[in-house]
Image: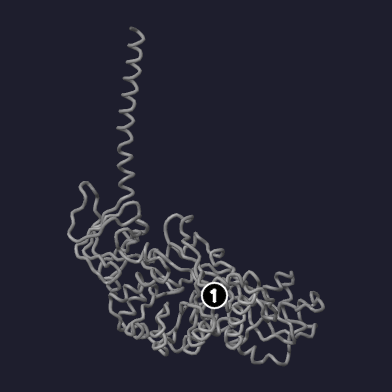
């Protein structure tokens, strides 16, 4: 009898304990459930594909849009966020993130940096250097058959570089203006400088995942970006798809396209591509040094990939590495996409000619003079990433001679021709950021619904993310931008940004 009473007492205590446990954990379960869900009531919901839903109710659970409808009642007991207007999170398909690795100290003469590395900073005099071996502060470092990093000895021509000197002075002035505007100078680069063909490198390896630039983009409504390498190599590194918010370890989405450059940037930016003297080619005097040279390096890189793929040997001064050829072979088969930066009309035509030669599909990036070849772009249907829109160039473009013939109505002309382009702000933020690019497109003739698609739906398709982001549809990631008025209006501003179902920025 005593044993049965003891068992009953133990069972009663267990039951009481379980009851207390349930009562204690229930509120925590409710809180956790509420934290994973969000309900938004919006006066207008711009879906991103041209549709606008009035009095929209958006239900979000676990970072995903569960439903969006007009006039629906909120689930009983849920807290509703009442807002005027919502749009999808914006997507910039050609961001230049704050990820530059400075080869030289900002704004400093590269020769001073070299002397500092040699421990001979006190010998710097700032003047031009003659290669005779008597005025070079680094002369004790001169070694037979090896060029001096400071003066170029013995491969520097003291009498044949007047034009180069004038060009460097001009570029120096342009870089000084860019530095004054708060943008990196041309010696701050992402692409590897040891070769003009480096598609086996990844821009992701240079990205600071904790960069404040992610926060700046997020505050401006940009929730997804494609980080593109700079334009200092003919065939550069692969870009990276990234989210701008959320846990740092989960921001990377995937590797992107190989970026090629047709134009002057490939030989003007980065470590100087001065014409080689005699036969020596180094990181400071590597080819190409002209547009013809750029096209040749591009052509030879893909030709070498074909030769290596068929088991034939490759040779020549501009031969790319086997690792580079392996990546370009995958570009040729379509496994890895290709982007080409071509700003001027002739460079755009060259891009089409070279890709036709090798049977490559590509995306056209930053075609400043696209207004000259609207017919070609319309006929071929090549994907286009355009922007920023400008009259007077700023930021990275401020020092480029390829930005002189920009037109404010180019986006309108391309849209009128049926070209579904993606807008980009590149390195610009704030008053010149992606939302402002859409506003400028509207100001110069683009339909507002089409401008919305240019920063949401079209870039999501171009990046292959349209099943996940780009529109406010059920089943997609809950990246939402809250406005206090009409999107892209000069009287409106972004109040809140919801990233993956969580409020990541709130102005209030």
Crowd around label 1: few <14 · some 14–19 · many ≥20 (10 Å):
some
Percent position (x, y) of residue 50?
27, 72
Q: Say which of 329 and 433 sits in front.
A: 329
Residue 118 placement: quadrant: bottom right
Residue 416 placement: quadrant: bottom left
Quadrant that contains the C terminus: bottom left
**Residue 369, visible in the rendered structure:** yes
Q: Which residue is mark 1?
A: 332
Residue displayed at 39% across by 71% down: 459
Q: Say which of 391 and 421 sits in front.
A: 421
Please state the total of marks drawn on the protein image.
1
State left or right for residue 255 relative to residue 484.
right
Percent position (x, y) of residue 468?
37, 62
Q: Secondary structure at mark 1?
A: helix
State left or right for residue 504 relative to residue 151.
left
Percent position (x, y) of residue 467?
37, 63
Residue 263 placement: quadrant: bottom right
Residue at the far top: name it. 1
Q: Say which of 301 and 392 sits in front.
A: 301
Percent position (x, y) of residue 198?
60, 72
Residue displayed at 33% across by 20% down: 13
State left or right for residue 287 relative to residue 205.
right
State left or right for residue 298 relative to residue 465.
right
**Residue 387, visible in the rendered structure:** no
């Amino acid at each position: 009898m005593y044993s049965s009473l003891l068992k009953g007492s133990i069972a009663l205590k267990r039951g009481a304990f379980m009851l207390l446990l349930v009562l204690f954990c229930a509120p925590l379960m409710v809180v956790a459930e509420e934290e994973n869900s969000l309900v938004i009531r919006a006066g207008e919901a711009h879906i991103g594909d041209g549709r606008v839903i009035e009095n929209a109710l958006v239900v979000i659970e676990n970072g995903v849009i569960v439903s969006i409808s007009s006039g629906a009642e909120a689930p009983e007991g849920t807290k509703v966020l009442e807002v005027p207007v919502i749009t999808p999170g914006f997507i910039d398909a050609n961001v230049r993130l704050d990820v530059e690795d400075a080869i030289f100290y900002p704004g400093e003469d590269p020769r001073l940096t070299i002397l500092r590395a040699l421990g001979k900073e006190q010998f710097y005099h700032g003047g031009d250097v003659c290669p005779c071996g008597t005025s070079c502060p680094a002369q004790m470092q001169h070694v037979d058959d090896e060029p001096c990093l400071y003066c170029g000895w013995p491969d520097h021509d003291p009498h044949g570089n007047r034009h180069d000197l004038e060009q460097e002075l001009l570029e120096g002035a342009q870089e000084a203006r860019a530095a004054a505007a708060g943008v990196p100078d041309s010696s701050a680069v992402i692409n590897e400088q040891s070769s003009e063909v480096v598609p086996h490198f990844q821009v992701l390896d240079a990205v600071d995942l904790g960069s404040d630039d992610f926060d700046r983009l997020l505050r401006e409504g940009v929730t997804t970006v494609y980080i593109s390498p700079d334009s200092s190599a003919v065939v550069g590194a692969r870009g990276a798809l990234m989210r701008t918010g959320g846990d740092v370890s989960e921001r990377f989405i995937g590797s992107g396209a190989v970026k090629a450059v047709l134009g002057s940037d490939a030989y003007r930016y980065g470590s100087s591509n001065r014409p080689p003297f005699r036969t020596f080619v180094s990181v400071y005097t590597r080819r190409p040094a002209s547009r013809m040279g750029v096209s040749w390096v591009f052509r030879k890189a893909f030709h070498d990939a074909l030769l290596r793929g068929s088991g034939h040997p490759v040779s020549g001064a501009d031969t790319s590495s086997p690792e580079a050829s392996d990546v370009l072979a995958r570009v040729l088969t379509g496994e890895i996409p290709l982007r080409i930066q071509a700003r001027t009309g002739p460079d755009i035509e060259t891009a089409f000619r070279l890709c036709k030669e090798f049977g490559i599909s590509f995306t056209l990036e930053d075609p400043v003079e696209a207004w000259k070849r609207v017919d070609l772009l319309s006929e071929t249907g090549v994907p286009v990433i355009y922007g920023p829109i400008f009259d007077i160039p700023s930021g990275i473009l401020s020092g480029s001679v390829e930005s002189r013939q920009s037109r404010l109505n180019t986006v309108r002309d391309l849209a009128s021709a049926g070209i579904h382009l993606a807008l980009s702000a590149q390195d610009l933020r704030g008053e010149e950021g992606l939302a402002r690019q859409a506003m400028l497109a509207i100001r110069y003739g683009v339909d507002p619904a089409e401008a919305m698609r240019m920063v949401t739906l079209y870039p999501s398709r171009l990046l292959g993310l349209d099943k996940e982001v780009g529109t406010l549809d059920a089943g997609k990631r809950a990246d939402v931008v809250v406005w206090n008025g009409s999107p892209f209006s000069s009287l409106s501003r972004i109040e809140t940004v919801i990233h993956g179902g969580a409020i990541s920025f709130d102005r209030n």
